[in-house]
Amino acid sequence: MVDVLLGLQWGDEGKGKIVDYFAPSYDVIARFQGGPNAGHTLYVKDKKIVLHQIPSGIFHDNTINLIGNGVVLDPVTLKRECETVASFGVDYAKNLYISERTNLILPTHRALDKASEVLKGNDKIGSTLKGIGPAYMDKTGRNALRVGDILDKNFTTQYIRLRLKHQKLLDSMQFHEDISAWEDEFFEGIEFMRQFKIINGEYFINERISEGKKVLAEGAQGSMLDVDFGTFPFVTSSNTISAGVCTGLGVPPQKIKEVIGVTKAYCTRVGSGPFPTELHDSVGEELRKTGNEFGATTGRPRRCGWIDLVALKFACMINGVTQLVMTKADVLDAFTELKVCEAYEIDGKARQQVPYQMTKLAINPVYASFKGWDTNITQLSSFDSVPEAMKDYISHINGYLGAEIKYISNGPGRDQIIPVL
Ligand code: GDP
Ligand code: IMO
Ligand code: MG
């Protein structure tokens, strides 16, 4: 069977840490979408590492890590990341497999990403500029180069042909950038990739499932950044929700069992786009400071606000969430009052549904207030010892969402997690 772990907000929910925690119970960890726009932070032997392309099970000796067909892969980032992982003593080539159908990110995709943002001016998405949108456009436009193609003797010719096409586009956008250094790195990355097991991912996964092995699909980004259901156009270019697992790995829907949704105890967003519960005051600043809310991929300050139950319930619905993990609960330790958004007031009416176009509407969040627990919870390991005020906060959220928080993360460390028994 396949379990799925994914983010329910606008990304950076702490997925990497939670996958690393669950990894010993799984035989395979697989990324099914996204690319190096992801930044998943793990603490290994108390040292921080941020993974962009490699699944977060790589530090576990007996776990195979698969980069699935739904991912867009930048060979430059992959090489760099493998070198970092090796400095932790990991034999990455042993446990890292790549699907031959995975689409490649070319240096010109990165240039096109930049050019597109420049053209958008004030309406820019706030992309990570890793070439994600243009790479997925080449996939759906049926032009892309895929990992399996690097084994073809005509790969360079195919590359030049696509690059030429991109160059024409860049010229028409009047965007000029010297990409020759990127190109050298790209081909070094391609050579580096030859050492990996480049496999047919869909047969691999389905054979493991038939053998009774356990697979965990690791989401990147978050449900509100999904290209169909997120705050379009301020989204990423892939399906980040559980349905993406089927197309991103070749897994039939009946094989999906648990859908583990990860949410912060509050809410953040990096990049542009609607964020109804965003706080522009000292409370927002306090969340950013205490939560150390700076992007793991770009270093940009994250926008912060209270937890948004309207958006969370929507995310639970479209994903079929069966259990929840709440991260960064410790960030709320010193707050005397907590708020949760339970409705959006639009044109004087309270609504509990996510509207079609958040961007163009004035949304007033309707809050319920809670007493803070005002206790340091970072050393707790059992739910019994959790403060009553926190139990109230959690049980209220469970009630609203109709799903249960099964784990509470109370610090960035590997062992800072409280099972809710
Ligand atoms: P991801 O993209 O969903 O994997 O999340 P990121 O790694 O981008 O961002 C999560 C940040 O919060 C990282 O810096 C983590 O080290 C940190 N983190 C994860 N869980 C917790 C937690 O429970 N408490 C605190 N204080 N930090 C956490
Ligand atoms: P993880 O996996 C948070 C955001 C960008 C931008 C929008 C589109 O670490 O949760 P893109 O580069 O995809 O064209 O950017 O999506 N974004 C993320 N925000 N966490 C991420 O990944 C993100 N990946 C993309 O900031 O607003
Ligand atoms: Mg992240």
Image: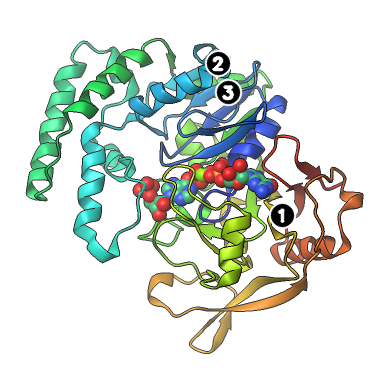
- Distance (Cα) linking label 3 and label 2: 7 Å
Q: Position of residue 418 (x, y in %)?
A: 80, 44
Query: Taking 188 as reference, is 366 left or right?
Result: right
Quarter of the view holding residue 77: top left
Report helix, strand or loop for mark 1.
helix
Q: Which mark is residue 329?
A: 1
88 and 275: which one is in front?
Answer: 88
Q: Which mark is residue 95?
A: 2
Q: Which residue is mark 3?
A: 58
Q: Position of residue 159 (x, y in %)?
A: 18, 24
Relative vertical location of residue 49 with respect to residue 290 in this rendering, above or below? above
- Distance (Cα) linking label 3 and label 1: 26 Å
- Residue drawn at the location 26% of the way across and 39% of the way down: 110
- Distance (Cα) linking label 1 and label 2: 33 Å
**Proximity of marks 3 and 2: CB atoms separated by less than 8 Å:** yes
- Residue drawn at the location 23% of the way across and 29% of the way down: 182
Relative vertical location of residue 298 with respect to residue 202 in this rendering, above or below? below
Which residue type carries mark 1? Ala
**Proximity of marks 1 and 2: CB atoms separated by less than 8 Å:** no
Position of the N terminus, as image quadrant, is top right
Q: Residue furthest right?
A: 384
Query: Taking 73 as reference, is 230 left or right?
Result: right
**Disc 3 crowd, CA 10 A, few/some/many (<14, 14-19, 20+):** many
- Residue drawn at the location 56% of the way across and 65% of the way down: 285
| Ligand 1 neighbours mark 1 (CB distance < 8 Å) | yes
